[in-house]
Amino acid sequence: MKDYFKKIANHLFNSLKNSEILLLNLDAEKTDFVRFNHAKIRQAGNVRQVTITLNLLFKRKTLTSAIRLSTDFEKDSLLLLRTLYYLRREIPELSPDPYLMYERNINSFENDIESTKLDNYAMTENIIDSCSAFDMVGILSSGTITKGFASSLGQFNWHESDSFNFDWSMYTETGKAIKQNYSDREWNQKTFSNLLSASKEKLDVIDNKEMIIKTGDYRVYLSPSALNEIVEMLSWGGFSYKANKIGSSPLHLLQKGERSFSKMVSFSENLSNGISPKFHTEGFIKPELTELITNGEYANSLVSPRSALEYSVNHNAAELYESPVSIHLKKGMIDSNKILDTLKDGIYISNLWYLNFSDRNNGRITGLTRFGCFMVEDGEYKGPINTMRFDETVYNIFGEKLIGLTDSQQLLIDSSTYEERSTYSSTLPGAIVEDFKMTL
Amino acid sequence: MKDDFINQVKPLLPKTDYCSFRFVSKYTNIISATRGVVEPVVISEDDGLMVTIFHNGGFGYGATSNLTQEGILEAVNSAKEWADFSKNRLAYHPDLSKLVNQTGSYFTDEDDNWSKTSMKDKADYLLSVNKALKSQPTISNWGASLRFNKIETLFIDTNDSYVRQKISYLLPQIIASAEHKKEIQTRTFGGHAHARQIGYDFIDQINMVQQAKVLAEEAVELSKAPNCSDQITNAVIAPDQMILQIHESIGHPLELDRILGDERNYAGSSFVTPEMFGKYQYGSKLLNITFNPTLDSELATYNFDDDGTNAEKKYLIKDGLLLRPIGGFFSSQRLGLDHVACSRASNWNRPPIDRMANINLEPGKDSFDDIVSSVEDGIYLQTNNSWSIDDKRNKFQFGCEKGTLIKNGKLSGVVKNPSYRGITESFWKNLSKVGNSQSNVILGTSNCGKGEPNQTIFVGHSTPVCLFENVDVFGGV
């Protein structure tokens, strides 16, 4: 794939006229998707897709077109040249783009991960055999993800990795469920067996009479997965420079210094785990670490090159939507082996679901409990709870009502597959929060 | 897709119990202007193929953007290999003998073609909309955009089926935010809800410049308005909020794959169980819901779904009684139920699953004025801006951009941050008036997410204004 991309890029760059600059982005994947229901295959297949996006720059004007391709050089080069001619014909009609910025320095690097030769049939067989006694439902996505960048100025970047992501739930006959995820570059049977055993243990606990709880304020433990749902809502503009400027950020009061989080809370964008590519679609190299919130105070926003020009600030190579791709929350002091003891009386929340803003200005979020939520009394599991709706502000969750964060974090690799497999991840601890509002 | 291409690929259909080729060619063009600047124009061309094979008790698919003969044969092989592997490991295998030959076509009726207006003219028009939006100094964010999608599908199979469809849709969007004492309020042109299968003349019909002026004024008014208070009250709900109410608490819970558990790891299941069809009173007698892929210009109008099933209008709920699920040809076999043509895929690279198409609330008898004048104390809720519902589609909460109080049958004062919450099983029973066809609006959204692997698809909802009693309404912090 790399040789193909280099050959295509050279072919297009040789076709450029004076004053034209061409930026190319390649997105490709070869993935087997196996969907399960009742521990059997519901749908299984393979998807191979390759896209190249051409961004033609000419006299401070820009026009972009994304084309799906075959990787057959003869066929694709004709299609891409046709597209280049189209962009060349249309671009003079456009107005100059005052916020156009692209990398003029050359920062080439290639990140090839040695192929691990994932055996998707063996993994599927293993999953079916291991889960045959359970009502398991979920999806295995496995294969190669490739990202590439090439510029007619001479830069070339490459990011390729083989990985799998098995995201599944196990249900009891009464409809209660435990959710789990296993994602990595190589399948390790022992790790999978341990995860499965942990799910089975929790399934036994949850397979008890449902406790119907009332609306009101509860002390809760939010697992890293549950907390991740809330952090994802913060990512809807919370860390975006532009969103804070135009007022659509749920953290605009924090950014303005009018509200604060607990000193225990430090968020950063940290690309060191290598899951996301470190190059921007316009060629900028992303910093490995950007402090976002430090000791409860807003530190930095994610700033895209466009925002940098619109607001006359420096950018930090954030993509257009200025959302984190690899967010980290610093761990705390709560002993991860003593979560129930520390929670003592309250609700253990493994997963939250379908979050949205109920008052974005004030950082207020609503959503629901879903998989693996238990009532805990005197540090002991008491039983599963009914589905409850919460409605709470992030200034309570990460502020005055935050009791503490756990002393270990969990890496959560995004299992999302809209259009293509995600390269996002989060690294988060769990949290204990007081007076968490349940409203329905 | 030309006939000579079809003739080339037809011989590649393998000799299996059943095989289909679904070619999709998708063109997207998005032009937007934000805060007075035209943003980079987005153009995307996306061609690919999905091969589906049922063979010897197994099922598999292979999807590829490589439309050379070699690429198509690779996809056939992938599908065959998964079909071989899944034999005796499938959750269910359909009765293929019930499949029949399907032949036909469908093309969106566009008066004015998208490409007739130049990119520059569209951009200039959006700049004029921007100018109208920034009509007042407290407008802090503003923008307008046009999204055009053209989706051509060709479906052939080993039953000699031949279905060709071309759907074109247009989504105009406008946003205006106003700031007052650090309070930011936003008005939009129906959120994402004005997507239609319609020609570019739609842009003249809706007059985006005039819409922009009104929205900007409303955003400024809202930024200075009091918060909505907490109350149990009568809610008159506008079509651009009804679209979400129908979508989340009727459309999704009736999807048969949810009822059968396929979606339990992701999008969720349903409070609806198979025994409820034909017996369960979903709402008041005023509630009539149709699966209607036949309504002109509605977003998900078509003649065939992505499994090649021919489409027709059917009632899902009649006089409040639940009749049938949204289940496609293959899916419905799992319960022995009647099917609708709802097996749809977001693109060539995702397999078809049970999906809403156009799910419509049929108009009633009352005019908007009659409905408002019948309310002694209540609130008129417009334009969805937040949605959330539990995994069984029961406990919901919606936020709206604008609330207008109703006192003694008259609209009387705007409130900000209006939201309401409820439970599907009781909410629809409180439907007490349904607007007439004059209050009916054809709407559609292009971003309904579901499925593993994930898929985003376009769905239509046509609905009049409706009145509900005993609604739990509340405001912001």
Image (tube, helix red, strand yellow):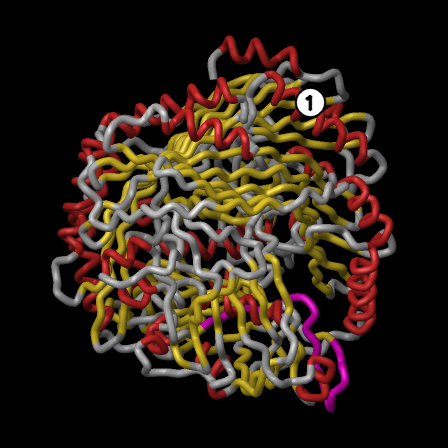
Which residue appears at 26% of the width and 63% of the height?
A313
Where is residue A321 shown, x and y percent of the image? 38, 55
Query: Considering the numbered disc 1 on the image, is that residue within a helix, a strand or a loop?
Result: strand
Q: Nearer the viewer, residue B466 or A124?
A: A124
Q: Position of residue A50 (x, y in %)?
A: 53, 33
The residue at 68%/55% (across/down) is: A183
Q: Judge left or right: residue A151 versus residue B346.
A: left
Which chain is home to disc 1? Answer: B
> Compared with residue A375, is residue A13 higher up or lower down, i.e. above or below?
above
| Within-10-Å neighbours for mark 1: few <14, some 14–19, many 20+ | many
Quadrant where the C terminus of chain B sits is bottom left
Label total for image: 1
Q: Residue at x 74, y 48 (%)?
A: A37
Residue that badge 1 annotates: B19
- Give the magenta range: A365-383
Q: Is residue B209 magenta?
A: no
- Give left or right: position of A256 versus A413: left
Q: Amino acid at mark 1?
A: Cys
As drawn, B158 above or below B276: above
In the rendering, at what x and y percent does residue B363 appear?
40, 47
Image height of A334 relative to A1, above or below: below
Q: Nearer the viewer, residue A124 or B234?
A: A124
Residue positioned 68% across, 49% down in the render? A164
Indicate left or right for B317 with B214 as reference: right
- On screen, residue B353 above or below A203: above
Q: Where's residue A394, x and y in %?
A: 46, 77
Is any part of residue B259 visible from this angle? no
User: In this rendering, does residue B287 appear at all?
Assistant: yes
- Magenta highlight on residue A378: yes
- The rendered magenta stretch, by its main secondary structure, is classed as strand
